[in-house]
Amino acid sequence: MAIERLIVGLGNPGDEYRGTRHNVGFEVIERVARLLNVRLERFRARGDSGKSLGHGCEDSTRGFALLEPSTYMNVSGVAVAAARDRYELNSPSILIICDDFHLPLGRIRVRPKGSAGGHNGLRSIIAMLGTDEFPRVRVGIGESPGPWQEFVLSRFARDERPVIERTISDSTDAIAAWCLSGDFDRLMNKLNAPPASQDPLQS
């Protein structure tokens, strides 16, 4: 089965990071896997690089791969480049899901390419791939009130959790559809619109 698309959720491995703002990419990937009834298994390339699974799409000859790097956020590019090489993909076929502390809580921004925007995981991927021309889904985790290094490793407050749950759910549905179709315009149109409950003038 040929892998045509790679979907990568960024985060840090280990129970101590589970549920933190920096790990929303992991949460989305795990829910996409459950929604599509696929199992994440060990991905071994350039060491133990993460959890990954290739799964059939529209027919038995085409598929996608999910990747949850175990290389820690700041060196995410090692795992992504290893998966790119393993599956012989070009960069526009690699979708990255990550947190963004520049976006309001619950806001999603989808772009076909772009800079790292201060995100160390994206910076590592750009360096390892040698290009910033890969699509990304950035999930707003709220704007940092202080040092961002501490903020991204904190957990969501009780009143924030329902918002991020809805955001992760919306992202999961749209990204699962992209796994099966590869229709990036549809993904952008679905996720770039402000949530119905959010006043676009406030975003």
Image (tube, rainbow, N blue to C red):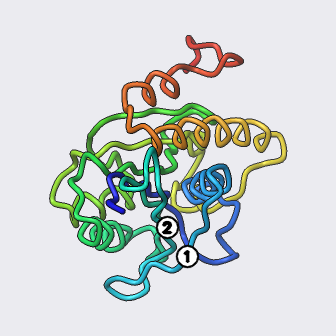
Q: Which residue is mark 2?
A: 53
Seen at 32% across and 53% down, the residue is 4
Measured as percent of width and height from the top left, residue 195 is found at 63, 22
Residue 194 relative to residue 121: left or right: right
| Residue nearer the viewer, 10 or 2 | 2
Seen at 37% across and 53% down, the residue is 62
Q: Quadrant of residue 63?
A: bottom left
The three-letter code of the residue at mark 2 reads Leu
Which residue extends farthest front? 60
* Proximity of marks 1 and 2: CB atoms separated by less than 8 Å: yes
- Residue density around tag 2, few if under 14, some if 14–19, many if 20 or more, within 10 Å: some
| Residue nearer the viewer, 4 or 61 | 61
When the figure is inspected, residue 2 is found, relative to residue 165, above or below; the finding is below
| Residue nearer the viewer, 55 or 192 | 55
Q: Quadrant of residue 74?
A: bottom left
Seen at 50% across and 66% down, the residue is 68
Measured as percent of width and height from the top left, residue 46 is found at 31, 85
Which of disc 2 and disc 1 is earlier in sequence?
A: 1
Q: Which residue is mark 1?
A: 41
